[in-house]
Amino acid sequence: MYFTKDTVLFLNGKFIKAVDVHIDPFSQTLHYGFGAYEGIRSYKTLNGVKLFKAYEHFERLKNSCSQLSIPMEFDSEELTQAAYQLLEKNNLTDAYLRTLVFCGPNMRLTQTPEVHLMMGAWKWAKYHGEKLLKVCVSSHPRPDPATIKVDAKVTGYYVNNILATTEAKSRGYDDALMLDMNGNVAAAPAGNFFLEKDGVLLTAPLGNIFPGITRQVVLNICRALDIPVVERNINPHELESADSAFLCGTAVDIAGIESIDANTFRKEWKESLGAIVQEAYRCQVLERSFSYVII
């Protein structure tokens, strides 16, 4: 589903057919998860095909590499230009782009000087589609920020997220909510979490969660629309008395939640603050005015 014989990738500064790409089977990233990545979406807007927050995503990729001391020779402007060329070469408009910085062969637990950058793109709908989600609280917590760099998008960190998602689906749910090391609600495996309660949106503070770019866009939208938002720790017991909730992320977009641990919310999704944010977010990525969105 990710590529065909005609798909073009961007690899180490050159455009190459995906079928001609070969990865060393002893790559340190393959064996130990020592690498960094970013996901970006493109949209067919009123002003043509546009990448949403491309520069911010590539700057974050650079930051992730810096925190791992992985050298990256490309700057954000170069990668943005390459991303647009990649879309054009693959005839894509509404697409998802994945940029991966991965290391060369090294079976030791030491850094290797050989570093590669790959960028691919494919047509990919919202991570969860358009449905409202049934989620559960996972038994797999978020990693302790004292042991890893939680604000870096590191490939190996996502093993825990896969475990949480797999557990949720095995129990009949669409996705999971992960707690932080102190037992507070942190985030979903693939997105940040917002909870509506008494006319206010609550979301976990930075420190134990990944600082999502879409999360920041949501905060900006709320400021523009005068929707109150509080960043604070959320006790799992508060989920039971919530009015509504949603997830957000580049792949997820804005995904409304129907229930948590089979407990439905007091508000219908279409009447929630999340639905307002969802519409405003859609307007922003498509470069339409959302001034008509009325609270």
Image (cartoon, grey):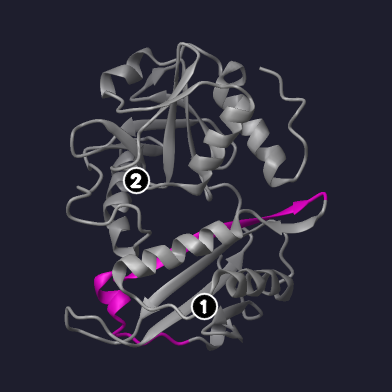
Residue 81, quarter of the rendered image = bottom right
The three-letter amino acid code for the residue at tag 1 is Phe
Provide residue 37's location: percent of width, then percent of height.
43, 65
Q: Residue at x 31, y 82 (%)?
A: 27
Residue 239, quarter of the rendered image = top left
Q: Which residue is mark 2?
A: 165
Q: Which residues are magenta?
A: 22-46
* Mark nearer the N terminus (1 vs 2): 1
The three-letter amino acid code for the residue at tag 2 is Thr
Q: Is residue 122 left or right of residue 69?
A: right
Categorize mark 1 by other alpha carbons within 10 Å: few (<14), some (14-19), many (20+): few
Provide residue 201's location: percent of width, then percent of height.
47, 23
Q: Is residue 25 magenta?
A: yes
SS assignment at label 1: loop
Categorize mark 2 by other alpha carbons within 10 Å: few (<14), some (14-19), many (20+): many
Q: Residue at x 62, y 68 (%)?
A: 80
Give the position of the N terminus as an image quadrant. Answer: bottom right
Give the position of the C terminus as an image quadrant. Answer: top right
Quick one: 196 or 90, which is closer to the camera?
196
Q: Which mark is residue 74?
A: 1
Mark 1, mark 2: which one is toward the viewer? Answer: 1
288 shown above or below 115: above
